[in-house]
Image (spheres, grey):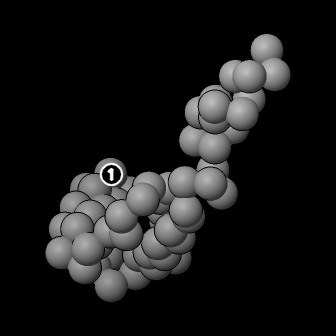
Amino acid sequence: MPMLEIVVARKEPLTIEQKRAFAREAVEIFHSVLGTPPGRLRLAFYELQPEESLDLLVTESSEDSRRH
């Protein structure tokens, strides 16, 4: 049974409509590419705050720029 995990890091959470649309497309892709029967794909969304992702590390704050 295939498992697809989606990790999203953004300020606004995904809407239920966005998750449903993604899920529908994922089911179709897994079916057409791997032959996964409908209902067999497991899908999990993990939502991170931007500060829990690389965004925080690559965005220089004003305090960081004063140190340089």
Q: Is residue 55 above or below residue 27?
A: above
User: Residue visible at 79% across and 14% down?
Assistant: 68
Q: Is mark 1 on a helix, strand or loop?
A: helix
- Residue 45 is situated, as x and y percent measured from the top left of the image, at 47, 72
Q: Is residue 48 above or below residue 17?
A: above
Visible residue check, residue 2: no
Q: Quadrant of residue 56?
A: top right
Q: In which quarter of the image is residue 32?
A: bottom left
User: Residue visible at 53% across and 70% down?
Assistant: 46
User: Residue visible at 65% across and 57% down?
Assistant: 52
Q: Quadrant of residue 48?
A: bottom right
Q: Which amino acid does label 1 sit on?
A: Val
Q: Is residue 65 above or below residue 33?
A: above
Q: Is residue 47 left or right of residue 24?
A: right
Visible residue check, residue 53: yes
Q: Is residue 9 left or right of residue 20?
A: right
Residue placed under numbered mark 1 in the picture: 33
In the image, 17 versus 36, the foreground residue is: 17
- Residue 64 is situated, as x and y percent measured from the top left of the image, at 74, 29
- Residue 14 is situated, as x and y percent measured from the top left of the image, at 32, 68
